Amino acid sequence: MPKQKSHKATQKVLNKHKSGLITYKKSGGNHLTAKDSSKQVRQRKNKGQLAKGIADRLKNVI
């Protein structure tokens, strides 16, 4: 049986670290942010982190 291919769309969105942590870029931070508070805009600059249960399922997909 051949090796399973990586899911390319998921691979482009999620970043896998050596420690096993999976991060992603938060949405809604590029433009049209004038209506949002400074706190909201600032928090979107940070990377998001997947929950452990979801990360375990996606590790072999990336």
Image: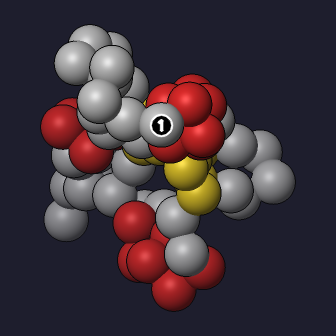
x and y percent of residue 51 in the render?
A: 55, 75
Question: Residue placed farthest to the top in the image?
Answer: 31
- Secondary element at tag 1: loop
Residue 8 versus residue 40: which sits nearer the camera? 40
Q: How is the image coloured?
A: secondary structure
x and y percent of residue 18 in the render?
A: 77, 45
The answer to whether one can see residue 44 in this image is: no
Residue 28 versus residue 61: which sits nearer the camera? 28
x and y percent of residue 9 in the render?
A: 18, 37
Neighbour tally class for label 1: few under 14, some 14-19, many 20 plus, Cα within 10 Å: few
* Residue drawn 34% across the image and 58% down it: 61
* Residue drawn 21% across the image and 35% down it: 8
* Residue drawn 81% across the image and 54% down it: 19
Report whether 62 appears left or right of 44: left
The answer to whether one can see residue 17 in this image is: yes
* Residue drawn 59% across the image and 57% down it: 49
Instruction: Using the image, determine if residue 8 lies above or below residue 31.
Output: below
- Quadrant holding the N terminus: bottom left
Q: Which residue is mark 1?
A: 37
Report whether 16 appears left or right of 18: left
x and y percent of residue 5 in the render?
A: 23, 46
User: Amino acid type of disc 1?
Assistant: Ser
